[in-house]
Each structure stands twice: as structure tokens, then as C-alpha cells.
Image (cartoon, rainbow, N blue to C red):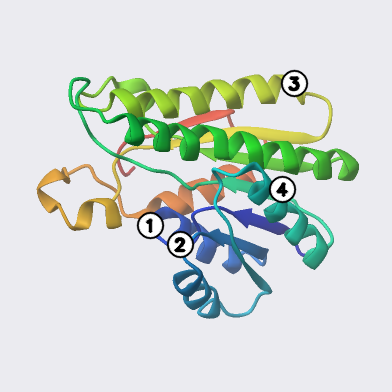
Amino acid sequence: MAKVAAITGAYKGLGASLSMALAGKGYKLALVGRDRKELERFAAGIKNTDVLPVVADVRKKKDCERIVNAAVRRFGRLDLLVNNAGVWKSAKIDDAKEEDIREMFEVNVFGPIYCSQAAVRVMRRQGSGHILNIGSTSAVDNKSSHVAYGSSKAALIGFTGCLGKELEGTGIRVSVFSPGGMKTHLFRSRPERMGDDFMDPDFVAKRIIRHIENPGNKWHVVLRIPQ
């Protein structure tokens, strides 16, 4: 039986690389994004597996419930939830705008919590599943100008640890993968911000697939440079 994955932020950057990698592993996919045109264009390019585009905003609890319900209605189950959607805006504490801070926490923290709430209900019934959150080294590296973004990702890591403890013995695995800088759409328009250690998202996706396939891996994996 083919496994089923739901991926938020699916059509750009790491999300796109993960979607393609999981399709290559035979997963059926529920791909989530806010831009219908871009999402459907990306989904149409994935061949040899069943793909369901779901237009949704993870800041909204009802949308997160709809993501999971749509995946289960289409495929009958949900084996993997990848909370990948994220917002990054750099600013020092004096310059951080309230609306930017709120957006980062709504997308980077509340979204994964809402999606996980919906997924846990399904995975409990199945007796199995994996919730994978995409963190960031900004949560642990104390970078200047990352006070809001780093804080949001630190909160995500804390949520992951608590949820994993809560779900021990249920058959549901919970983990977080924290990559360093990547060569994605966030930085391609500002190449001066990319360091020599910035990674290709396809490389990071392969490492994440390795993590998914090995249930004995640590609950929190940090990846800073290509190895």
C-alpha cells in the first residue's frame, strides 16, 4: 500500500524538493499552498503518483483541518505530515514590525500546531504516522537580526519535543529537522545574503528522506553544511 504525505508550503524551495523526493519514493501527495495557480501548476508537473492540490492558509485552524480531511477523503489515510510552510523576515529588535512578528508566529508555530491537531486524530485511529516539522538552525545559533524568526523556530522545536512526549506509545512519531541556510527563493533575489555554506534544497530533501526512512533517528536533527 502506497503511503500518503501532506506537505505544507509545497510548491517552493524545500517544499518543492521534498514533494518531488517523496513522489519518487511512491508516496501519494496532498500538496498545500496559498496560491492556487502556482500550486496547481506545480502539482501538474509531478508524474507517476496521485497528487491532490489543497489551497489553504495554515494560519487558519479550519484550513488546517480541511487539509487533513481532504487527504484522508482522497487517499483513505495519512502517514506523513510535513509542516514545512514558513515565513522568514529579518529585522533587529528595534526595527521588527508587529505585523511581521505576528505573521512569523502564525505561520511557523500556530500552523504546525493546528495541522498536527488534525493529523493526530487520524493517526491515532490508524495507530501509526509521522509528524515532521521543519525547523531552522536560527533557533539555536543566536543570529543577529533573527529575534522573531529564530524565536518562532525555537517555539516549533519546543512544541515538537512536547508533542513527541505526549504521543509516546501511540505509534505516532514526531520529529523536527532544522536545516541551515538554503538556496531558495527567499535568497535568490538577494544573493549577497547567501554564504558559502548555503545548501541546495534538493540536498536537504535527500537528508530529510533519509531521516524519514530511519525511525531510529533522533527526534531533532540539525543540518548546517553539506556533508
Give the residue at x 82% y 45%. Answer: 122
Q: Nearer the viewer, residue 101 or 86?
A: 101
Res 1 visible:
no
Sequence order check, earlier mark of 3 and 4:
4
Q: Which mark is residue 16?
A: 2
Q: CA distance from mark 2 to mark 4?
A: 22 Å
Inspect the image, locate mark 1, and give the three-letter code of the amino acid beneath it. Gly
For the residues labelled 1 and 3, say whether their Cβ atoms are less than 8 Å apart: no
Q: How far from the left and from the top, in percent, is residue 31?
A: 59, 62
Q: CA distance from mark 1 to mark 2?
A: 6 Å
Inspect the image, locate mark 3, and give the three-letter code of the amino acid beneath it. Glu
Q: Which residue is mark 1?
A: 13
Sequence order check, earlier mark of 1 and 3:
1
Looking at the figure, which quarter contains the N terminus?
bottom right
Residue 168: quarter of image: top right
Determine crowd level at label 4: few under 14, some 14-19, many 20+ residues with C-alpha closer than 10 A: some
Q: How far from the left and from the top, in percent, is residue 172?
A: 76, 35
Give the residue at x 65% y 47%. Answer: 64
